Image (cartoon, rainbow, N blue to C red):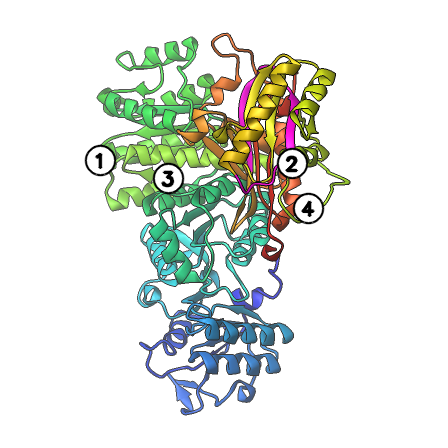
Amino acid sequence: MRIHGMDAIFKPRSVAVIGASSDPKRIGGRPVDFLKRHGFDGPILPINPKSPEVQGLTAYPSISEAPTTPDLAVIALPAPLAVQAVEQCAAQGVRGAVIFSSGFSEVDADGAALQARMVDIAREGGMRLVGPNCLGIANVRHNLYATFTPGVEKHLPKPGGVSIVSQSGAFGSYCMTLVRMRGLGVNTWATTGNSCDVDFADAVAYCAQDDDTRVIMGYLEGATDRDRLVEALELARACEKPVVMMKVGRSAVGAEAAQSHTASLAGADSVYDAAFRQYGVYRAQSVDEMFDVTYACAESAAMMQGDRLGLVTVSGGVGVLMADEAEKLKLDVPALPDHAQKKLKEVLPFAGVRNPVDVTAQLVNQIDLLETNMDVLFGDGDIHGAIIFMSTVGLVADLNEAIRSGLERIRAKYPGRPMLFCSLTEPEGRAAYEKSGFIVFEEPTRAVRAMAALRYFARSFARAGEKDPIPELSNLSPLPDGMVNEIEAKALLAEAGIGIVRETLATTPEAAAQAAQEMGFPVVLKIASPDILHKSDIGGVALDLHSAEDVRSAGARILDLASEKMPGARIDGLVVAEQAAPGLEAILGVTQDPAFGPVVMFGLGGVFVEALEDVSFRVAPFGPAEARRMIDEIRSRKLLDAFRGAPERDLDALANALARLSAFAAHHGAALETIDVNPLIVGASGQGAVAADGVIIPAMRGDH
C-alpha cells in the first residue's frame, strides 16, 4: 500500500497554513484558529505575504521564509496558486500537504491537467497530497485539525477508536459530528476530495495499521483503483479492523451524481455489494445503520463467534419481533436445552424459557435474577451472544446499578460473548451503562442488526487466514483479435481446466452426420458462428438426434435458418457435440466492471436467472472456498442439494469451475469483454460439471 509518508499528514510535528487569514471564519483562517484553540502541540506557521501577523501568530511571506520547514502544509489558495505553493513546499522539503482548493479535475479537462502537474511536482519532491477539493483531515489524539469544517468550531470529539474516511467532505464532517453526538471517540478523520494522491484506499490502509483505530467508517462514491482498494480492505480484515461502509450510487441518478461529484467511475451497484461481501466490508443501508454498527464494533469487547443468539425480554411480543429480525439476518435463535429450561423454570416459574426467554414484568421484583438467567443462557444454552430487552426498566435509576453489576459479572465470566442492552434510559443512565462498557440501544431490531454485524465481522476475520488458493493456470493461449465461435471458445475454457463436452466442427450436414456416427448417438447440433450468440433464438440448435439422417436433416435446416435470419453472419459450419448426461443447468459468466475489472457471475439456468435475476457476483480471481460462498448466496441454492427426488449436485466441481473461470478472467484482464457459459451441466455428486455451450467476446484492441 502507498502509506509511506502519511505520518507527515496525520501526525505532523509542525504545520504551515498557506493562504492563512486573520479572519477565523474564512477558509484560510479556520485551520489557524482550530490548531491554536484546540491545542495542537507544535509550531503553527501562517503564510501570508500581506500581513506580518495572523490571529496573534507571526506570519511569513512564503514557506521559504518560515523559520523551520513544517511536516505539513495546509493550502487555502485558488487552484493555480495552490500548484505554485506545492512547488515551493516541495523545494523546501515539506513532506505533506492538504489542499482545500477547488478548480481541478472535478471541473474540466484544464483542471485535470493542472491537477496532474501538481501531482508530478509533489512526487518529484517526495510529498504526499490530500485533496484537492477536500475539507481536510484531523487526528483527534494529536489535536490536529487541518480543516475548515464548522463541525469542530465549538465542540470536539473525544479521542477514541473510530476512524472516518470519506470521499465527500460535507458528509465526512457530518459523520464526525454524529460520532461525537453519539458519545463515541474519534481517532483519524480524512476527507479525500479529488484523491489526486492519497485516496480512499490509502487512508483506509493507514487507519487499518494504526493501533488506535478500532473500526473504520467509510463513505465511498466510486473506486478509481481496484487493486489498491482490494488490498486496503484485505489489510483491514487481516488487522481485524471492521470497515463499515456507506456506498452511494445505487440508482442511476445517484450513480450519475456520484460520478460528477468525484470524477470517478462508479461500477454496477450489485458488483460493489459482492465485492464488499468478498472482502469483509459491512455495507450499511442507512445512516442510522452505519452508526449503529460502528457503535457496536467500537464498543463491544468481542465479536459474535457463532450463530446462536439468546434473547431475554420483559415483553413476549418484542421477543418475537427480535426473533423475526434475527431469522431474516441469518442468526439462529435456538430453543434452549431441556436442562437449561428446567433451571430457568425453577427461578422464574412464570417465564417463557425456550428462547426468546420472556422473564415477564416479575423480574422487576427480583432484578438479581437477570444475572442468573444470563448465566444459564451462556453456561447451559451454548449461546454466542445475547440481547436483553428491558422496555422502560432502564429509566428506573435504583434498578440500573443492580442490572449493571450483574451484567458485569456475567461479562467477566463469559468474556467472548457480546451482550447488547436494549431499554429506554435517561441520558445519565445510558452514560453509566456505556461507562461500564455496555452497548445500549432503544429500538430492539436495531440491536439485532448490530449483533448480526458483530457476527458478520467474526466470520470475515476468520477468513483472513483461510487457505483458499486461486487455481494456477499455465500455457493459456492469447485471446484472438476477433470474434470466436463456440468450438474456439470452449477450447480456450478447456485450457483453464473447465470441463467441456466432446465436440467437433463440421462444414456440411453430411460431414456432421459422419462425425456424429463416429462420436456415437445421441448428439446435439448447433450453428457455429461468432456472430450468432443466441443460437436457439434463430432455430440454430437441435437436441437429442439419434441417427445420421436426423443429423443431416437438422443440419440443413439450421444452415438455411441461419442464412435466412442472419444474412450477414459469418458461418463456420455446424458444431456436433455429445449430448451431456442429465444434470442441473447453471450459468457462469464474466463481465468487465468499470471499477473492479473482471467480475464472475453465477446462477441457475432458466427462469432463475432470466426472470428472477437470482445471481451472485465475485471479483476475479478467487479460490474454491470463495466460490462456495458465492454459490450459497443465490435464493435457489436448495436445488443444488438432494431435492424432490433429484440427487445432490457436484458442488466441488461447480466451485472448481467458478474458481478456474475467475483465474482465466483475471489472466486475460482487459483483453476480455464477456464470457457466457450457458449452460454448465452440473452432475450428481462426484460426476463433475461440463460446459455445454460457451461464448467468449474479446475486447476490441483499442479498448485495452
In reply to whether residue 203 is colored magenta, the answer given is no
The residues bearing labels 1 and 4 have C-alpha atoms spaced at a distance of 75 Å
The residues bearing labels 2 and 3 have C-alpha atoms spaced at a distance of 68 Å
Residue 140 or residue 82, whichever sits in front? 82
Indicate which disc, 4 or 3, sits on the residue closer to the N terminus.
3
The tally of labels here is: 4
Indicate which disc, 1 or 4, sits on the residue closer to the N terminus.
1
Confirm or deny contact between disc 2 and disc 3 (CB under 8 A). Answer: no
In front: mark 2 or mark 3?
2
Horizontal side of 172 relative to 631 (left or right) equals left
Height in image: 33 above or below 564? below
Q: Which residue does the numbered mark 1 point to in the structure image?
A: 396
Q: Answer few, some or many: residues within 10 Å of disc 2's Cα (few below 14, many 20 plus, some between 14 and 19).
A: some
Confirm or deny contact between disc 3 and disc 1 (CB under 8 A). Answer: no
Which quarter of the rendered picture does the N terminus lie within? Answer: bottom right
Spot occupied by residue 124 in the image (x, y as percentages of width and height)? 64, 75
Q: Which residue does the numbered mark 2 point to in the structure image?
A: 572
Height in image: 485 above or below 156? above
Mark identifier at residue 480: 4
Is label 2 in a helix, a strand or a loop? loop
Which span is picked out in magenta?
Answer: 567-589
Q: Which residue does the numbered mark 3 point to in the structure image?
A: 439
Confirm or deny contact between disc 4 and disc 2 (CB under 8 A). Answer: no
Residue 54 or residue 639, whichever sits in front? 639
Height in image: 693 above or below 8? above
Residue 396 seen from this side: yes
Indicate which disc, 3 or 1, sits on the residue closer to the N terminus.
1
Residue ID at (45%, 36%) = 454
Q: Answer few, some or many: residues within 10 Å of disc 1's Cα (few below 14, many 20 plus, some between 14 and 19).
A: few
Spot occupied by residue 669 in the image (x, y as percentages of width and height)? 63, 48
In reply to whether residue 572 is colored magenta, the answer given is yes
Q: Which amino acid type corresponds to the residue marked 2 in the rendered image?
A: Asp
